[in-house]
Image: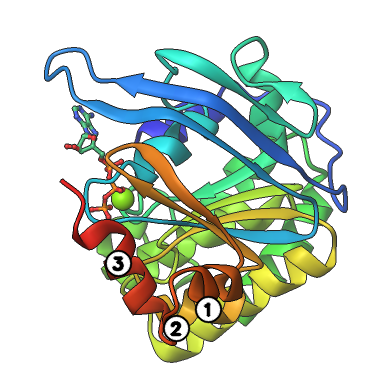
Amino acid sequence: MEELETTCRIRPGYANGGCAGLLEARDLCKRFGRSGVLAVDRASFRAEAGEIFGLLGENGAGKTTTLRLLATILQPTSGNALINGIDLVRDPGEIRRQIGAVFAEPSVYDRLTPREHLRYFGDLHDLPRRQVVARSTELFRRLGMEEYADRRSGQLSRGMKQKVALARAWLTDPPVLLMDEPTAGLDVLSTQVVEEFMSEARAAGKTVIFCSHIMSQVEKLCDRVAVIHRGAIIAEGTVADLKSRFTQERFEDVFVRLVGDKP
Ligand SMILES: Nc1ncnc2c1ncn2[C@@H]1O[C@H](COP(=O)(O)OP(=O)(O)OP(=O)(O)O)[C@@H](O)[C@H]1O
Ligand SMILES: [Mg+2]
């Protein structure tokens, strides 16, 4: 529920629809207090407006933590990021107006229906009710959620909850999307819709940061990728660049070469 709670501090006056995005992480570090784990280790990368930027890495590499830092759910131990020119550390409230985030573990309010979720988030962003209704109707239709739009979210399946989280992230049409394994557990049709949404976001000049373990999806969607290993970015480029740099035909093999023999 952590990301839901942070959204509650969004300042009113949201009017980002249609804006272009851009994101620059600068030496981001996150060390978790009790365990002392350095989950993100001076990660720097830049994702342009109109780009789907893949963040790839093994389990535990630091992808989700990086996205949680960018979504202002966690505070960096050091380093910073600029999102649409806004300083992450100095102005997290403003950053929240620029982003829509979806995490692999969908967090929804069990007692609210999908429709109530969107209404609530629309209110937090000060969106006109009529706009929320129109956008919700479109999102429910595209994601095939109409049948259960008025059922309590606690009774929904995992994939259905994931769609609530997706609809919530897209409701405000933000310039920057942070997508952490957004299609994990989704059926084929819904996966296609999510991929279409990401492509549409790119075409509209938005920035999409996309984490996935599905290499075919990464190859299909990402303009550029960064590979993160033990919290540090160890390679960056287009899929084609990385394939030629490592003289591999399959992107899976590039990935194995990059991280497989590293301690
Ligand atoms: N809240 C936390 N407290 C302590 N350590 C954490 C916390 N969250 C993550 N970590 C640690 O940070 C490291 C990076 O985890 P993270 O979830 O970012 O990995 P990931 O790349 O998203 O992996 P996966 O592909 O499995 O989702 C791991 O060593 C993990 O144990
Ligand atoms: Mg993760």
The quarter of the picture where residue 82 lies is top right
Quadrant where the C terminus is found in the figure: top left
Counting from the top left corner in percent of width and height, residue 120 is at 58, 41
Q: Which residue is mark 1?
A: 219
Contact, CB < 8 Å: mark 2 with mark 3?
A: no
Q: Which mark is residue 257?
A: 3
Counting from the top left corner in percent of width and height, residue 53 is at 60, 57
Counting from the top left corner in percent of width and height, residue 141 is at 63, 80
Q: Residue furthest left?
A: 35
Marks 3 and 1 sit apart, C-alpha to C-alpha, by: 17 Å
Contact, CB < 8 Å: mark 2 with mark 1?
A: yes
- Above or below: residue 68 compared with residue 53: above
- Above or below: residue 49 compared with residue 25: below
Q: Nearer the viewer, residue 46 or 87?
A: 46
Q: Which residue is mark 2?
A: 216
- Callout 2 amino acid: Ser
Q: First in sequence, mark 3 or 1: give its number.
A: 1
Residue 109 visible: no
The quarter of the picture where residue 40 lies is top left
**Residue under the image location 55 percent in, 72 percent down:** 239
Q: Residues within 10 Å of mark 3 (few under 14, many from 20)?
A: few
Secondary element at image label 3:
helix
